[in-house]
Amino acid sequence: MATTPVSQALTRGGAFLITAISPDDVFTPADLSDDQRLIGQTADEFVAKEVLPLIPDLEQHKEGLMAQLLKKAGEVGLLGGTIPEEYGGSGLDKISATVLAEKLAGYASFAVSHGAHAGIGTIPIVYFGTEEQKKKYLPKIATGELLSCYCLSEPQAGSDALASRTRAVLSPDGKHWILNGQKMWITNGGFADVYVVFAKVDGEKFSCFIVERGTPGFTPGAEEKKMGIRGSSTVPLFFDNAVIPRENLLHEIGRGHIVAFNTLNVGRFSLGAYCLGGAKNVLAASSKYSKERTAFGKRLCDFGLIKAKLGEMAIRTYAVESMIYRSAGMIEAAVSTPGPAVDKTLQAMQVLEEYAIESSISKVVGSETLDFCVDEAVQIFGGYGFHEDYPVARAYRDSRINRIFEGTNEINRMLIVQMLMKRAMTGVIPLIPAAMKLGEEVLAGPSFEETPSGAFAEEERVLAQAKKIFLLAAGAAVQRFREQLAEQQEIVAALANIVMDVYAMESSLRRAQKSSATRAQAPGGAGDAAQAFISDAIDRIEKEARTALAAVAEGDALTTQLAVLRRFAKHAPIDTIALRRRVADAVLAQDRYPFEGR
Ligand SMILES: Cc1cc2nc3c(=O)[nH]c(=O)nc-3n(C[C@H](O)[C@H](O)[C@H](O)COP(=O)(O)OP(=O)(O)OC[C@H]3O[C@@H](n4cnc5c(N)ncnc54)[C@H](O)[C@@H]3O)c2cc1C
């Protein structure tokens, strides 16, 4: 499938904190092309027809069933999205790949297995494989004839992946690599044919290898007993003098971390999209149930506290969706714009690195929003939510892993700030001049800036102030701790939370503005969702900034900074209870997420 060029202003990764963009600059679900919608429809139909009926057997780990299902997905072209057409894939554009990931979330175990194969199990070969490796593996991975997986974690090396103890040494005749060690938690590991394995050459140089099932000395272990995603395969792998052909080194010796971390960038972005689909599914189930169940002579959905839950689930899902499609649009625009790199694959890799901050945001906010939604769904179902015969109990268990794998949310929060600081220090994004300008503004005292007018004027103003709050808090933290800031993890996490909320606020607002320019907004529409989200987000941002500043400054300096913070965070009160009720009514009117495709 050809990529769809996206008309959009190019912005650097992380630059959203200091640049202003217009609604026309953001890609939204309303901008999906017919082809992109069709991909979503195909995935939807596949899940409904082929996956959902098998859930009871898949949950019981019926031998070979998940592998069969993946192969079936391959037959209808759902596995080759990341693989270029010349190697038998469909070379999906980033937006289509996002739609696909979202729609496969109907059964989390399938979504995870799909991601391990078609995402992180394939990307290393697509981006770093030799021509021979690509020709040998990719066409078969695209059809599902070969199933793959990504093998980084070890019993004592998870977040700290570079502490790997798996070793590779060249055999005396120089023809083979001999691998020794153990991997842990490998999704698809029980049935895969192709294992992308990370190991240290001579115990020092972190590198990557392709290992095939049946390799002498290599044994996948027994299935782990898991809290959730029970339909997926998760096993340890054992390498006991495993003999691997020399040509199965993937990329260069000592450059395995480049393969590992760039692959995770892509995986994190998709994980956010899978979570988005999951959140929509539990919202639909909760809406239906809240109409069927009665208490005190009323339907559950007629109680304010149930409406508050449905409304908030939809509002947060709207924010996640707005961010993810905006990021997908930026990535796609950058990939399809001619760049300095001659090689298209290399250019795609550079673009994915460029938007690594946005990918981490997708992962963290996607997984935490899904966790919020499944938790509220269980609450709406009451005791039945706690029973395995009802769908939300499984969704609750399945959701939890998303905050742990593909880099825990703690690690991703650190990464967001680390990457931003690196970009600031190297001048890739002019954060330092922006912070200095803000410092001058603060010293000059309150000014009579031109205030925005028209619809969403208050939200526009609040968004601009939120960006200033980030600069205020981050500037103070960097000044105090300088290179040692990374060691102040609580402050770093507070800054990351501000960054994520700013991106969510802006993405929600621009999408609402874009949609209100083309269609009248009914009560409970996107405008209500964006307004409620922004009003709550600025309060969260103020709190995070206060926590950070109090750890950074003291005495008069702190008093002054908190006064500035209060001035920036000031906002007109709005009735978020009424907004949430209206959004809940929109959910109930359709029994689903009400902003689909809008
Ligand atoms: C079901 C499942 C499927 C998985 N699939 C795969 C797969 O296909 N391939 C693969 O390679 N791996 C896979 N994993 C492994 C997964 O990526 C790791 O579990 C994850 O990276 C966390 O590592 P860990 O479990 O060793 O936890 P640890 O790294 O020990 O972390 C424990 C806690 O400490 C925190 N922590 C760690 N370091 C820091 C730090 N520097 N600062 C602050 N807090 C920190 C973490 O955030 C976490 O809260 C899977 C795991 C599970 C459970």
Image (tube, rainbow, N blue to C red):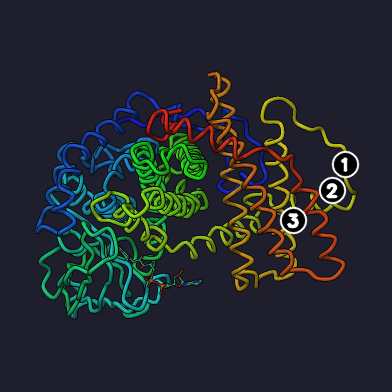
Between residue 557 and residue 135, name the one nearer to us: 557
Q: Quadrant of residue 418?
A: bottom right
Q: CA distance from mark 2 to mark 1?
A: 8 Å
Residue that mark 1 sits on: 447
Evaluate whether residue 411 shows in this view: yes
Residue that mark 3 sits on: 472
Q: Residue 109: horizontal and vertical position, in percent?
A: 25, 53
Q: Quadrant of residue 560?
A: bottom right
> Which is closer to the viewer, label 2 or label 1?
1
Whichever of callouts 2 and 3 sits on the residue coming sooner in the sequence is 2
Q: Quadrant of the N terminus?
A: top left
Q: Residue 90 bears which disc, if any?
A: none
Secondary element type, mark 1: loop
Q: CA distance from mark 1 to mark 3?
A: 17 Å
Give the residue type at disc 1: Ser
Residue that mark 2 sits on: 441
- Residue furthest to the front: 297
Secondary element type, mark 2: helix
Say few, some or many: other residues with alpha carbon within 10 Å of mark 3 (under 14 / 14 to 19 / 20 or more): many
